[in-house]
Image (cartoon, rainbow, N blue to C red):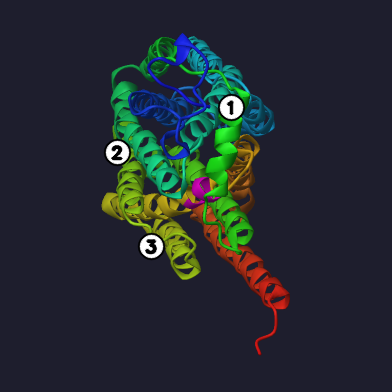
Amino acid sequence: MVTSANAGAGPAQPTLSPSKGGAAPAQRSMIYAASAMMNFAGVIAMVALSYYAKAYLGATLMQLALMTFLGNAVYVALCPPLAALSELRSRRPFLVLGTLVFAAGYVGAFFSTQVWHLYIARCFAALGHALFWPAVEIELAAEADTHELRQRMGRFNISWSTGDIPGSLVAGIGLAVRPTLPFLLCAGTGVLISVLMAWARFAPATPDAQARHREAVDGHEVPPMHQAFWRMALVANFFSVGIISVVRGLFPDLAVDALHYTGLKFGVLAMMVAWARTGTFILLERHHGWVYRPRRFFAVQFLFPLACLLILFAHNFWAFALAFTFIGMGSGVVYFSSLYYSVHGASRQGPRAGIHEAVLGLGAGLVPFAAGPTRTLAEPYWREAIRAPYLLCAALSLLAVAVQFVIYTRALRRQAETQPPQP
């Protein structure tokens, strides 16, 4: 699809150069702004929802895990079909409807009085996210060559992650003022984004636009190991986002019961993930040396078990801040890799973007759901059982690296077998 300020005036022009295709610069700026605002609201919701459920509605650790699981189950189920559909149609209806559904979910959360009310709000918000995020990624990736793709995906990542930074802090401040105030902020932001996207002009998908996209794809320099790197990045992203979901969704159990942190303190800790990840995105967008480099990709993932060990044994606030920073740095590399390898060289970017987002939702739902019962299971044997979820996360992060290593070595072996013998 091609978008421009005059997109609604007539059909897309077939003479447009593939290297200048996709959304026009002004439209991409609006999409970047919408991404920052959407993630700003999403992070407010994520931080506030779990803390509000624990501190004010008395949710158990298992209830916190179930709330996260249900929302992500909706997201996982809907992302692939909605992504495939949004590739073939104008993305504007998806973006407008998605933000309105998101807003409706948090209007419901504002009036909640029981934990199960928050389950419903979380599922509505997940539907809104499934309509929004794949459509944004497809719009930005359309007709981009290899250089433009990395640049656009980098700016997109910086945008949404920048929204993450104030979101965590605003959630903490809002919780301190009134427990349900963050939900009103989420709803209001969702409505504001829908107005912005309704005002923007998006060209409808046309056969000419599809042809130009195929021409752009033909120009991608895709290495033979591309599929292996894509699978490795998906595995890494699954566990990375799962760990982030644990520290944001389940950490209030430790923060409230053992550390006696206020909502503001928890918000500051959550913000450290965003600061570190945004800085990592800026570096990756400016430098291309990390692309298809296995050693760097493997090495950075050891930040996850290191962070989990810090959470396991730390009692000082700044030690927790360092742990959250490590998680942000690792997740920045892993997320960028997963998104870039998903749309790089894909003839149908919709399904691949849908898979990328579905894996995010799957990890964000399953990992905290698996971590939820660990406190109860460990209590008969461990005085610090409240920290058991982070022991599980450390083990899972090492398992993720092992699985990726198997994928990589098998791909190397297949590549060696298919190469002609040297004379």
Task: Say if the magenta span includes residue 120.
Answer: no
Q: Tell which circle, 1 or 3, labels the residue nearer the N-terminal end.
A: 1
Left or right: 409 in relation to 333: right
**Image quadrant of residue 400?**
bottom right
Q: Tell which circle, 2 or 3, labels the residue nearer the N-terminal end.
A: 2
Dot 3, how many residues are within 10 Å of its Cα: few (below 14), some (14-19), or many (20+)? few
Q: Position of residue 194 (x, y in %)?
A: 44, 13
Q: Position of residue 190 (x, y in %)?
A: 43, 16
- Mark 3 residue element: loop
Distance between the alpha carbons at the discs numbered 1 and 3? 34 Å
Read off the residue under disc 2: 268
- Mark 2 residue element: helix
Between residue 380 and residue 265, name the one nearer to us.
265
Relative to 234, is 46 above or below?
A: above
Residue range (magenta): 337-341
Camera-side mark, 2 or 3: 3
Read off the residue under disc 3: 289
Distance between the alpha carbons at the discs numbered 2 and 1? 48 Å
Q: Position of residue 395 (x, y in %)?
A: 57, 62
Distance between the alpha carbons at the discs numbered 2 and 3? 32 Å
Q: Amino acid at mark 1?
A: Asp
Task: Say if the magenta span includes residue 339.
Answer: yes
Between residue 372 and residue 38, name the one nearer to us.
38
Residue located at (52% from left, 16% from top): 11
Camera-side mark, 2 or 1: 1
Read off the residue under disc 1: 208
Q: Residue furthest front?
A: 15
Q: Position of residue 235 (x, y in %)?
A: 60, 54
Q: Amino acid at mark 3?
A: Gly
Q: Amino acid at mark 2?
A: Val
Q: Is residue 262 visible?
A: no
